[in-house]
Structure formats: C-alpha cells, structure tokens
Image: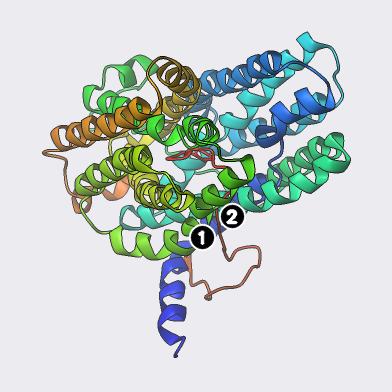
Amino acid sequence: MSVAGPVRAARESVSGLPRAFWWLWTSSLINRLGAFVATFMALYLTLDRGYSASYAGVVVSLYGLGGVVASLGAGVLTDRLGRRPTMLIAQSAMSASVALLGFVRDPVAIAAVAFLVGMAASASRPAVQAMIADLVRPEDRIRAFSLNYWAINLGFAVSSAAAGFVAQYSYLAGFLGEAAMTLACAVLVFLKVPETRPERMKATAEKPAEPEVRLGTVLRDGRFMSVVGLSFLVALIFQQANVGLPVAMGADGFSSSDYGLVIAANGLLIVLLQIPVTRFIQHRDPRRLLILSSLLAGYGFGLTAFAGPLALYAVAICVWTLAEIVNAPTQTGLVVRLSPVHSRGRYQGMYSMSWAVAGLAAPLLSGYVLDRFGAQWLWGTCAALGTVAGFGYWLLMRGLPPQAQETAAGTLPAPAPVAMPAPAPVVTEPLAAGPLVTEPLAAEGGPLPRV
C-alpha cells in the first residue's frame, strides 16, 4: 500500500503556519509533558500524606477555584501587559508554586499553595489562545487550534503514564519534575516566542478610535456571553468522563482498571483522528459543527444508560470523543471571531472560565443526581443538555458573518510561513495524542480543558 497519500495529508496539515506558532506549539507540548499535580493530587494527599478523602476533595476544589479566578485576571493581563509577559509570569509562578507544594506539610499551607498552583496552571491559557489568533491567518485558525490541542493531549498522555511510575517511588520527584518542565517552557517562550499583542487603533481623520474593552464590556456582549453559557453546558457534559462515568462504572461492578481500559479509547482516538478530522472540518460551517458536536456529546454520554458490557461503554466513549475532536478547535475559533482584535485576552479568559466553573460544578451536579435519582437520570440529563446546547448554537449563530469577511487586521503580520516536513519529532515539528484519564477540554481548553 502506498504511503504517499497519508504523508501528503500530514504535510498539508502542518504546513503554512508561522515559525512562531511552532515554538508556541512546542511550549504547550513541554508544559503538558510535565503535568503531575492535576492527575495525582488526590492520591498524593491520601496515600502519601495520609489525609482523609474529604480533605483531599477540599484541596482539589481549591485548585479548581484557583483556575476560575485566574481565567479572568489572566485575560485582562493578556490584553494589558501582553501575551508573552502573561505567559512568562504564569509559567514562572507555576514552577515555583509546584515545587513549594512538594515541600509544605501543614494542611492549611497545602490548601493555600494548591489554590496558587490552580491559578498559575490556568493563567497562561488566555494568552496562548490569543497569541495563536494573532499569529495565524483566519482560514488556518481551526487547524492551528487543533494542532495545539493535539500537542496538549500528547503531552498529557505521556506525562500520565510516566508520572504513574514516578509516583510509585517519589511524589516529590514528580512535583520537582513538573516544576523543571514548566520552567523550561518559560525559558523557551522567553527565547523564541515574540510578543504579538495588537495595539488599539487610535482616532484618525478617517476613523474614530476603537472603543476600550473592559470586563464589563465583555459581560454586556450578549451573543458572546450566550456562547460562553452554551460552552458551560457542553463542558458539564464532557466533565462526566472524570466524574460521573467512573462512579457509575464502579456501581455496575467494574474495577478501576476496567475504567482505565475503556477511557484509553478517548486518548487513542484523539491520536488517530484529530488531524484528519480537522482537515475535513476546517472550512465547514462552524454552526453546523457546534450543533453536531453538542448533540454527539450529549447523546454519546446518553448511550451510557444502555451500556452493560464493557464494550458498550467503549462505544459510548468513541461517540463523545468524536464530539470532543470537533468541538475543541471549532469553539475556540468561534471565540476568536466574536472577539475584538485588541481584546482577545479578556474574551478568551471569559471562555476559559466557563470550563473552569464547569469543572467545579460537575462533581456537585453528578453527585446529586447519582445519589438522588441514579445513573440513568444522569445520562438522560447529559442528552438533554446536549440538545439544549445544539439548539442554542442554532439560534445564536444565525447571521454570523462568514470567515472570509473577517478583516485582515484580525491577524498580525507574522514571520514567513514554514513548510513543515511530514512526521518528525523535532522542536518545531509536531506529534500528538491523548490521555488515559481525561480532563475535559481544558482543556488545554478547551472541550476537555487540558487547554
């Protein structure tokens, strides 16, 4: 069988993007390769330090609350100080706070430092997303966001596996390893990634000055805040991969290894499908893509209600993973299109906050529904939320200007595009994958915000 077709497709997927984007991509990969705290926080507190499960839950919630607080503050800093300074501050703070967390022993101190770590972990997301929008042409943004999301998944998959072995010998080594990797990420940004913040256009004889955008302005942007609300609903659905799904599987008699086995399908599919699916969707109507991904997410988790054998759980995971692959870059691209050029940080910060708040609300929602009504109601609620989100996107995006009408001012001049060879794991040439235990779009932003 000829490999010319796949090689050509891979080359086209990574070609034509600015060199600065690939340094930023590499920074995202390194950042996630060092991930340790988010995955092993609860185990560290209960198994290594001997604290109760309830105390561990409080600390993990404070970590999430730090992400909520940081999303808005980092968005403002991204617009005021710039993308690059915000990333450097966030990554330096993350490196210092993670290292400190490995040494503190007092329970109050651990909780306080965990809150700081949560803030630092989320603070760079608005800056990264705004910088990608600054660097990349409008027609290439879906592809660029997808590649960055792919890097986040690859890094998280590798770090989850490696950190598991590290944790068997020394949790402190895991904390210090993440601190070192995050510091390396900051050094890379300092040396290789240029500042891209657009300046607000001042008044001229032909045009008035662009209005200044504050957080209040973002909150009064009805269409955008409606998109944030819909993003929150979708995030609630995806968060059930970490919350409702393992609990429901445990109640059905499955072990943690069974859960790990089927959830691995999520990471495997992201590795295999993220790039080819992005090639298929990148020039298609974002409204249809967001409606489709919302329905797939809702009904993918809804299928879990009918899952008995382990294979049916895997089928349900495959359905909502496809929704994740479509939703992550499309949703982030939509946020860029609805954001004023000189205020992308604030808008991206508000969008990131919707995922952070969902991360706090999902455990409460799923726990309440599971305890009071049972798993069938939880999966039915997911299907209903997906339907509401899909209908909401249909209503809100009517009349959205096509991508081609976006002004050229929406993208800053960038270094000449670099044609990237097909698969080569060097500094500026990407690979990617997905995690064993997912963090619904973060992620990294994004759906599962590992984003």
Say what amino acid the circle numbered 2 marks: Leu
- The x, y position of residue 116, in whole percent, is 68, 20
Tell me: residue 226, above or below residue 424. above
Residue in the foreground of this view, choosing between 161 and 14: 161
Residue at the left extreme of this rendering: 399
Q: Are marks 2 and 1 in contact (CB under 8 Å)?
A: yes
Q: Please tell me which residue is depicted at 45% across the width and 30% down the height of the picture.
A: 352
Amino acid type for the residue under numbered disc 1: Val
User: Could you say whether the residue bearing mark 1 is in a helix, strand or loop?
Assistant: helix
In this rendered view, identify the residue nearer to me: 100 or 209.
Answer: 100
Alpha-carbon neighbours of circle 2 within 10 Å: few (<14), some, or many (≥20)?
many
State which quarter of the image contains the N terminus.
Answer: bottom left
Which element type, helix, strand or loop, lies under badge 2? Answer: helix
Q: Residues within 10 Å of mark 1 (few under 14, many from 20)?
A: many
How far across and how far down the image is residue 322, in percent?
A: 37, 52
Query: On the image, numbered disc 2 is attached to which residue?
Result: 154
Q: Which residue is mark 1?
A: 271
Looking at the image, tell me whether mark 2 or mark 1 is earlier in sequence order. 2
